[in-house]
């Protein structure tokens, strides 16, 4: 029995060391990738918002920018934020608490989302969703060690571009007309936004309330994965609880869901706990 316990103890130590090593290696990889985004964001020269440039935009879009921004406000070039929330991998699974941090650059659309999902005591999933230079990659590891997903390809690239578009409400100057983004009029409370980048084109419809807040985003261009195959399905995001950070009004709570033909599948509920703009010190 004593020998068995010793052997068991040795195996347990080896497993703990193996997981610890892999966690360190994954962290080093992600820190390096964050550094790439910081370097990219630091290349962009500062410029200021001018409401004169809004006159040709659809009326609800003008209303939105006048609500969320101020004349002369500095454009957002780089974003750091933290989130709490709930997430589930599939529609029939329970919600799991998550903590996440995310980084964006805006002159060249890019982001990195780092998330940890606590499944059980001492059992977790660590994920990193990245979009950089027109390419997306979703990496998911059990215990920061065992790879559950390492998704790449055209469907991931387009879906990542849509995600950037939907989350740009947290850094609204990225939604101002620019080299990769344009607006099309629909009606007094909605407008279509089109994004073109690195050979891909995607679009979605934002809905605005009377105050000028964006309250909903819908796109049919995002891909849903099922059993290793990808299908384009309607995808929606909802925004609420606007608060002001550094003079900019943004939604601090929201959720996203797939809208299938027979049901809706909500899968993420997020709350921003911290956000910083244009701070590009070394990670």
Image: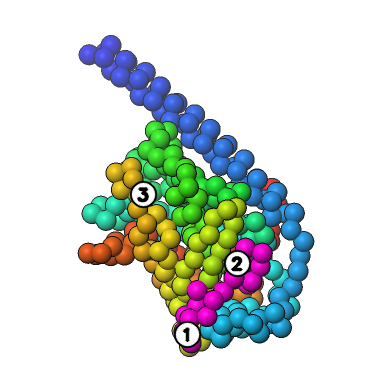
* Residue drawn at (56%, 82%) of the image: 58
Q: Residue at x 28, y 62 (%)?
A: 260
Disc number for residue 187: 1
Type of colouring: rainbow
Horizontal and vertical percent for residue 144? 43, 37
In the image, residue 142 lies in the stretch drawn in magenta: no
Q: Examine the rendering and report whether any part of residue 213 can be seen.
A: no
Dot 2 alpha-carbon crowd within 10 angstroms: few under 14, some 14 to 19, many 20 or more: some
Query: Residue 160, how many percent across, how many down?
Result: 49, 54
Circle 3 sits in a helix, a strand or a loop, which is it? Answer: strand
Q: Which residue, given by chain and number where applicable, does mark 3 sit on?
A: 230
Provide residue 278's location: percent of width, then percent of height.
Answer: 68, 61
Q: Answer with the quarter of the image where residue 263 lies.
A: bottom left
Residue 181 has which mark?
2
* Residue 95 found in image quarter: bottom left
In this view, the residue farthest toward the top is 3
Residue 96: x %, y % from top left: 33, 53
Start and end of the magenta stretch?
172-192
Quadrant assignment for the N terminus: top left
């Amino acid at each position: 029995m004593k020998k068995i316990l010793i052997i068991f103890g040795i195996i347990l130590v080896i497993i703990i060391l193996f997981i610890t090593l892999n966690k360190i290696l994954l962290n080093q990889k992600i820190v390096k990738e964050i550094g790439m985004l910081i370097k990219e964001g630091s290349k962009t020269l500062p410029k200021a918002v001018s409401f004169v440039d809004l006159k040709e935009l659809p009326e609800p879009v003008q209303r939105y920018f006048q609500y969320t921004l101020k004349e002369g406000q500095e454009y957002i070039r780089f974003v750091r934020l933290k989130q709490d929330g709930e997430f589930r991998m599939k529609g029939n699974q329970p919600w799991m608490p998550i903590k996440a941090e995310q980084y964006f650059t805006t002159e060249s659309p890019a982001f990195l989302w780092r998330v940890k999902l606590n499944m059980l005591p001492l059992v977790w999933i660590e994920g990193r969703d990245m979009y950089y230079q027109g390419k997306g990659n979703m990496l998911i590891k059990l215990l920061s060690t065992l790879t559950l997903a390492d998704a790449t390809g055209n469907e991931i690239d387009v879906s990542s571009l849509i995600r950037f578009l939907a989350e740009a409400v947290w850094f609204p100057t990225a939604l101002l007309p620019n080299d990769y983004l344009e607006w099309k009029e629909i009606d007094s409370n909605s407008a279509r936004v089109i994004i073109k980048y690195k050979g891909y084109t995607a679009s979605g419809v934002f809905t605005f309330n009377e105050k000028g807040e964006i309250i909903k985003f819908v796109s049919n261009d995002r891909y849903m994965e099922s059993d290793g195959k990808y299908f384009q399905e309607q995808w929606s995001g909802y925004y609420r609880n606007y608060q002001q950070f550094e003079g900019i009004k943004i939604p601090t709570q929201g959720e996203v869901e797939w809208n299938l033909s027979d049901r809706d599948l909500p899968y993420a509920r997020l709350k921003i706990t911290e956000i910083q703009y244009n701070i590009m010190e070394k990670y």
